Amino acid sequence: MELDSIQKHLLEEIADLHAIPDGAYNIRSNSASAGRRSTANIEITPKTDVSGLDIHIKAGTRRESMHIPVVMTQSGLKEVVYNDFYIGEGADVVIIAGCGIDNCGMADSEHDGIHRFYVGKNARVKYVEKHYGSGDGEGKRILNPGTEVYMREGSYMEMEMAQIKGVDDTERTTTAELDAGAKLIVRERLMTHGHQRALSTYVVNLNGEGASADVVSRSVARDDSFQRFDAKIVGNAPCSGHTECDSIIMDRGRILAVPGLEANDVDAALVHEAAIGKIAGEQLTKLMTLGLTEQEAEEQIISGFLK
Amino acid sequence: MLELKHLSFEVDAAGEGREILRDVSLTLPDGKLIVVTGPNGGGKSTLARLIMGIEKPTAGQILLNGRDITALGITERAKLGIGFAFQQPVRFKGLRVLDLLRLAAGKELTPADACEYLAAVGLCARDYIDREVNASLSGGELKRIEIATVLARGTALSVFDEPEAGIDLWSFQNLIEVFEGMRRNIRDSAIMIISHQERILNIADEIVVLRDGHVDRQGPRAEVLPELIGTASAVAGCRKSL
């Protein structure tokens, strides 16, 4: 299937893709596959009961990457997609997902991607997910990702999630279950503007000895937008967990941070931090003394903060 | 050349006007290093902030090369060639040292260019250019990076507000060398340093003593410094800032 220029632009925004990627990939465009390739170690097969993919990554796969971007340009499309990732023991892979919606029409467009990760013993996964919306139609661009992570002993997963522009409404839910020695790192970056709404919920269960999690969100709410960050870490064993929400509010933006910790083991060490505030006046002043206008200073501070 | 003419600055303290600066007139010619000193609370930092445009005077005029800049904002003054190093440098989450130096230079800097500015303030550039300007940096490191941003701007007039405040003795030694180097390469730029430190006073062309919001004494170093040394206020000032 050929992609048009808007679809190509969306692919660039969400996956830095300018051409067909190396390695395994599946490009989903307007609810159909626009191309798919499996490799010797990464097998992608479509599900038969529901929409979505089964992805099997062989044990011991080293330094391979796969891309599974989704683009939508038809106004009024609504889809729920289930992708299951089975990552074999000791594998070391990078998975780049992401969804871009361009909506020029009157009807809402919605993509709900449900991703389940089964991370094998001692496997390492880096997961990158970018969400982006464009188009000037009145129809909303809606993304409701659901992510479930099951981590076996000694596994490591790093999740980088970014939604910087153009998504009108999002409800993101991420849950994780960690066995002994498993480590989960989450870096979320979020910016909302206009009348956008973004809800982000994390529940991380540290079930095995030595499991650890670090969930950090940096966000900016501008104009009349609203965000809720709800992160809960549950320590069920000797473990360590840290959650942090660091936010800048501007204009009439609103942010609700609900950090939660639950310790069910005397050796669970859990920490949360949350800070919300406007850009510090002295930061603007400093950059203005370097010759930037107030607006340029603001842009630099925000882009640095969300980097 | 910078001229301050009859500058006054008042703040509103519990409904009553409190005078921080009163009728201050000063001239800072090109090619000179001037150190403003005096007891704490004498209005030195306020004077520096008025020059940069961070505060606006309640009376008086500020002229840069003959042009009245009293009504101009911070950005405009920066573009006209005024640089400012804060007494307490600001931290930024996410902005790296390299980003800040690039913004200061107003152009793309290669890491090699950035390294020159960092080396000039005694920092090993390789260890710093990718660091974020955040709470992970010590007070002394931040202070040197702050000075490096002023160097990177290459301004005609550079104002340093108590560069020695908040840094340890070892860093201070290094800092003196930085300012000595700036003095040697001053050419037709002008430097104003707010300081209590005798070693900084020692490299001044002129010294201004600001006390209780007005100029108590102004003159060449050779005349003013001997009068200051040994006075109670100078010693107390030095101890305090160390």
Image: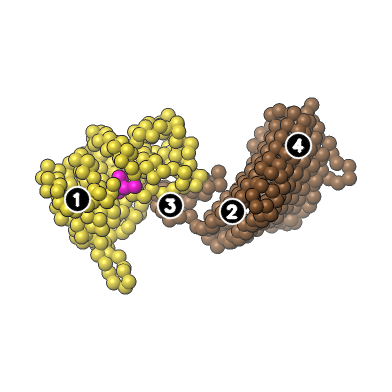
Chain colours: A brown, B yellow
Count the marks.
4
Toward the bottom, the furthest residue is B15
Q: Nearer the viewer, residue A51 or A184?
A: A184
For the residues labelled 4 and 2, the Cα–Cα distance comes to: 28 Å
Which of the two discs, 3 and 2, sits closer to the camera? 2
State if disc 4 and disc 1 touch (CB < 8 Å): no
x, y percent for residue B193: 26, 45
Q: Residues within 10 Å of mark 1 (few under 14, many from 20)?
A: some
For the residues labelled 1 and 2, the Cα–Cα distance comes to: 47 Å
Mark 4: which secondary structure? loop
Q: Which residues are magenta?
A: B160-166
The answer to whether B156 is drawn above or below residue B67 in the figure is above
Marks 4 & 3 on one chain: yes
Q: Nearer the viewer, residue A237 or A67?
A: A237
Q: Main secondary structure of the magenta part?
A: loop
Does A84 sit left or right of A102 as displayed? Answer: right
For the residues labelled 3 and 2, the Cα–Cα distance comes to: 28 Å
Marks 1 & 2 on one chain: no
Q: Chain of mark 4?
A: A
Q: Residues within 10 Å of mark 3 (few under 14, many from 20)?
A: many
The residue carrying mark 4 is A120
Sequence order check, earlier mark of 4 and 2: 4
The answer to whether B160 is drawn above or below residue A247 in the figure is above
For the residues labelled 1 and 4, the Cα–Cα distance comes to: 69 Å
Q: Quadrant of residue B201?
A: top left
Which of the two discs, 3 and 1, sits closer to the camera? 1
Which amino acid type corresponds to the residue marked 4 in the rendered image?
Gly
The residue carrying mark 2 is A272
Toward the top, the furthest residue is A40
Q: Chain of mark 3?
A: A
Q: Chain of mark 2?
A: A
Q: Which mark is residue B29?
A: none
